[in-house]
Image (tube, rainbow, N blue to C red):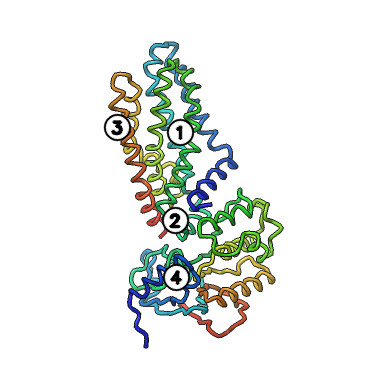
Amino acid sequence: MMTLASGHFGSLGMAAMTDPVAASAASIHVRGLTVRRGERLLFETLDFDVAPGNVLLVRGPNGVGKSTLLMTLAGIVRAEAGTVEGIEPTGLHLLNYQSGLKSRLSVGENLKFWRDMNGASGLTPEAALERVGIAALIGLEAGYLSSGQLRRLSLARLLVSRRPIWLLDEPSAALDAAGEALLGQLIDAHRATGGMAIIATHHDLPLAEPAGIDTLVLQ
Amino acid sequence: MSAFSALIARELKLAFRAGGEALVLVLFFVMVGVIVPFAIGPDRPMLTRLSPGIVWIAAFLSTLLGLDRLFRADDEDGSLTLLRHSALPLEAIVFGKLIAHWLVTAVPLLLATPVLALLLSMSFEQWGRCALALLIGTPALTAFGAIGAAVTVGLRRGGLVAPVLILPLAIPVMIFGVGMMDPMTGGGATLFLLALSLVVTAFSPFAAALALRAAGE
């Protein structure tokens, strides 16, 4: 039996400021989430939980509200009703079709900027670029990158600041086969340290550990 | 580097690499000063008398023109969304962007005032007052502009809407700015302008952040 008083979550929230991944002991609890875009009701009274080390795959046809669900969890879009517990704005990484990268800054400058903004709690920029396989491009302006390379650079952003929750919207878009394998490894490594991921995708991601992967189908 | 200084450094870097934009604003500022003597005719005492108003109109217009770039680029590439998950609150991010924007758009105007002073046959003393008035007044213009830019960030042609929106708000800046350049009433106007600048600069990051949050939906 578990009773989750709000004070309990408050203290975990405090811990998140000092060591984000240690605080990932806080599961995500979503209850009765209802989101409306304009006049259209996207989904109603959605319930789900994500425990540390687990992955939630969000599936469904185009336009059903997968991206909106992630934006709601990220605190950008306001929910009409329902509660989201266990997600702090500074405890998550959002990866969607917008890269947040400046074409006139070099690859290294872009990455260092996000590391400074989000906290230098993860890999160094050099190590993160090495990990995603674009270490040689560190001095190149981001405007010259291909969309696959941009996506790898966006993944490097998740590695330079450690945060317990990854919200990934079609993370494999523009990635080649090696890139998809890399993405799977990164998510596996993230899960191994107690991280959680909520992933909206049409693809089957190559994840090593099938246990702990739930699927949420929106219709 | 701290998050706040990293943000300002990035904004300055982007402004210098994009180059042209700040220069165009300065050229626009000077251009107004070039046109007016032709429009008024070769009446030097009259030019001298009108110069405070002309300088402020020039500064006003070029500040408004530069507004659009404040949040739009960050909104389009998604940085604005991602910045909301950074270690800084959105208000502090707006404030940092405001400082950087002022450095990039207003400081070049201050540096260009001697040229304008020459074109409008201002005395050395008048030029000094003019530069001081712009130094004190432009933060208020930039801060008002940040609110306008934030409110219109989601509109496609927002660049033209924002100036119209903040124009009425910014009129007091103009009144006290011009008043400050009058040696008779200068003292009181200086204090008013100073107070206005401080209040608006303190208040606008909150208003702009509120507007940006609403625009994100």
> x%, y% of residue A193?
55, 75
Residue A104 in the figure: left or right of residue B91: right
**Is disc 1 placed on a helix, strand or loop?**
helix
**Is disc 3 placed on a helix, strand or loop?**
helix
Q: Residues within 10 Å of mark 1 (few under 14, many from 20)?
A: many
| Circle on res. B88 | 2
Q: Name the residue under label 4.
A: A69
Please report, as a chain letter, where disc 3 is located: B
Q: Mark 1 points at which residue?
A: B62
Q: Name the residue under label 3.
A: B192
Q: How far apart are marks 3 and 1 (CA)?
A: 23 Å
Task: Give the mark nearer the N terminus: 3 vs 1.
Answer: 1
Check if mark 4's residue and mark 1's residue have beta carbons within 8 Å: no
- Tag nearer the camera, 1 or 2: 2
Q: Distance between the residues labelled 4 and 2?
A: 24 Å
In the image, what residue type sits under mark 4?
Answer: Leu
**Is disc 4 placed on a helix, strand or loop?**
helix
In the image, what residue type sits under mark 2?
Answer: Leu
The verdict on a common chain for dots 1 and 2 is yes
